[in-house]
Image (tube, rainbow, N blue to C red):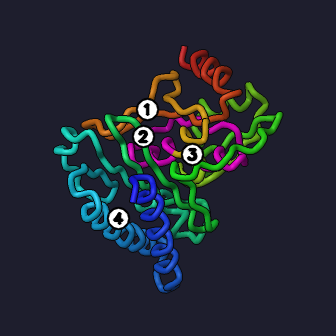
Amino acid sequence: MTDAELAAHLADVAGKLLLEVRKSGTLSAKALGKAGDQTANQFLVHAIREQRPADGLLSEEEKDNLERLANPRVWIIDPVDGTREYGEGRSDWAVHVALAIEGAPAVGAVALPGLGLLLSTDRPPQLPAASPVPRMVVSRTRPPSAALAIADALGAQLLPMGSAGAKAMAIVRGEAEIYFHTGGQHEWDSCAPAAVATACGLHVSRVDGSPLVYNRPDTYIPDLLICRPEWAAQVLELAKEIAD
């Protein structure tokens, strides 16, 4: 099984496990989110260590082991991206399984179990036609002011959405054109989505145009841009104007 096939398989199985946990119907939203995180993390960590024992591993739900920094191959996972949405019974949450090689998001899979979808670098979907009027995905609870300013400048339609993976995959699926985020994330929030988006031919970078780099001592990533290539230059220029 190739790395890409493994990532897709693990994300798919973890997503199905999470749906089964949610079917229990006996837990509060907060408790359900915690149970889902623990169940998916246990499965993913065990499977990766069994299938790729020589590789490093970084998970949101595991204590970080900085020995990963010496490894050129590091799996970066988010067992439940959008724990709140998962616990609330919404569909805009995801499972992220990625492999960073020499710091680049080389392989990845994003499962959207609530929608019955799996998107991966193994079989990147073809981008549908873009809308002439841009649509921008933003956080449904705390959209960054910079994103709102760029949307206003472009005359973009705002689409509030939950998890980072759901927002990034909305661009891949042709539901929106721009995902601009300056509210801060961690490596597990964006590595798998960045890998899938890159494989599909989308623009993927920091908001200053520099590349996203993974497997660093500090897992915090301040910002990112995933968008249709035809909008990248304009969005990056607006981001620079706002920063100045």
The number of numbered discs placed on residues in the rendered structure image is 4
Q: Which residue occupies the foreground of this view, 167 or 13? A: 13
What's the distance in space between the residues labelled 1 and 3, CA to CA? 23 Å
Give the residue type that dot 3 points to: Arg
Camera-side mark, 1 or 2: 2
Image coordinates of residue 13 in percent, x first then y, are 46, 70
Residue at 64%, 46% (x, y): give it: 172
- Label 2 to label 4: alpha-carbon separation: 18 Å
Tell me the quarter of the image containing the C terminus. Answer: top right
Q: Which residues are magenta?
A: 168-195
Foreground: disc 4 or disc 3: 4
SS category of the residue bearing label 2 = strand
Mark 2 is surrounded, within 10 Å at the Cα level, by few (under 14), some (14 to 19) or many (20 or more) other residues, namely: many
214 shown above or below 233: below
Task: Say if mark 1 contacts mark 2, CB within 8 Å.
Answer: yes
Name the amino acid, label 4.
Leu
- Check disc 4: other Cα within 10 Å, few if <14, some if 14-19, many if 20+: many
